[in-house]
Image (tube, rainbow, N blue to C red):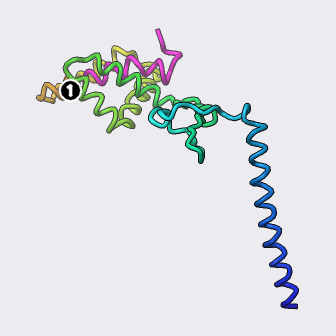
Amino acid sequence: MEVRWQVVRTTLKLLLVIASIFVLVCVGRVDEALSSQLPQPVASSISDESICYMRTTDGRTIDLDKLCQTVDAPKVTTPEQAFLEAYQQSALQNSEVGTLLVAQAKTEADSIVDRAKSVCEALKAGISLEEIQNSEQTSTQMESDPVVIKTYQANSAIAKKLAPQYYCPNFIK
């Protein structure tokens, strides 16, 4: 039984060697037949410009950019991401505290989104934007730091401006 397995192994090895030789011979012929189908060799400087190339054994460089191109997936934006992007753009319009608001938008995104959603909840409850603003002014009267007051006021103004657009469009005037 052991002798049979040795014969089978030797036969398989021999077939593998023959198949390898056959492939090498065929590849040479296929290479000639398909050379017009393959990407054409380009100047060797392609490696400086592209990461998608192949060097052949004879030193030619073949540009493979067409094979390597990827299709960008469409950008998926949640309402929160869209709101925060608009918030940051609006914040940058404020020369005094704009950069501070943008930093807050990155570190406290949830609270900024919640504030905008609370504006919509107030509007749905029948409270006007003016009434919201009056109640916010009352809450800043105890604050003495002018930067904190300006930041709070700018944050509130942006939230009131953008909230209807992103979270309750039926309240857009």
61 versus 20 height, above or below = above
The crowding category of the residue bearing disc 1, from other C-alpha atoms within 10 Å (few below 14, some 14 to 19, many at least 20), is: some
Residue type at numbered disc 1: Thr
- Residue furthest to the top in view is 173
Front residue of 169 and 132: 169
Q: Secondary structure at mark 1?
A: helix
26 versus 20 height, above or below = above
- Residue furthest to the front in view is 58
Percent position of residue 77, x then y = 52, 30
* The quadrant where residue 87 appears: top left
The quadrant of the image that shows the N terminus is: bottom right
Residue at coordinates 80% horizontally, 57% vertically from top-left?
Answer: 22
Query: Is residue 168 visible to the viewer in this orientation of the structure?
Result: yes
**Residue 158 drawn in magenta:** yes
Q: Is residue 16 left or right of residue 171?
A: right
Residue at coordinates 85% horizontally, 79% vertically from top-left?
Answer: 8
Front residue of 99 and 33: 33
Percent position of residue 91, x then y = 30, 21
Q: Is residue 149 left or right of residue 55?
A: left
Most common SS among magenta residues: helix
Percent position of residue 13, x then y = 78, 73
Query: Is residue 73 visible to the viewer in this orientation of the structure?
Result: no
Task: Report the residue marked by disc 1.
Answer: 140
108 versus 139 height, above or below = below
Which segment did they paint magenta?
Answer: 153-173
**Residue 62 drawn in magenta:** no
* The quadrant where residue 30 appears: top right
- Residue furthest to the left in view is 144
Percent position of residue 165, x then y = 47, 18
Residue at coordinates 82% horizontally, 73% vertically from top-left?
Answer: 12
Residue at coordinates 82% horizontally, 84% vertically from top-left?
Answer: 6
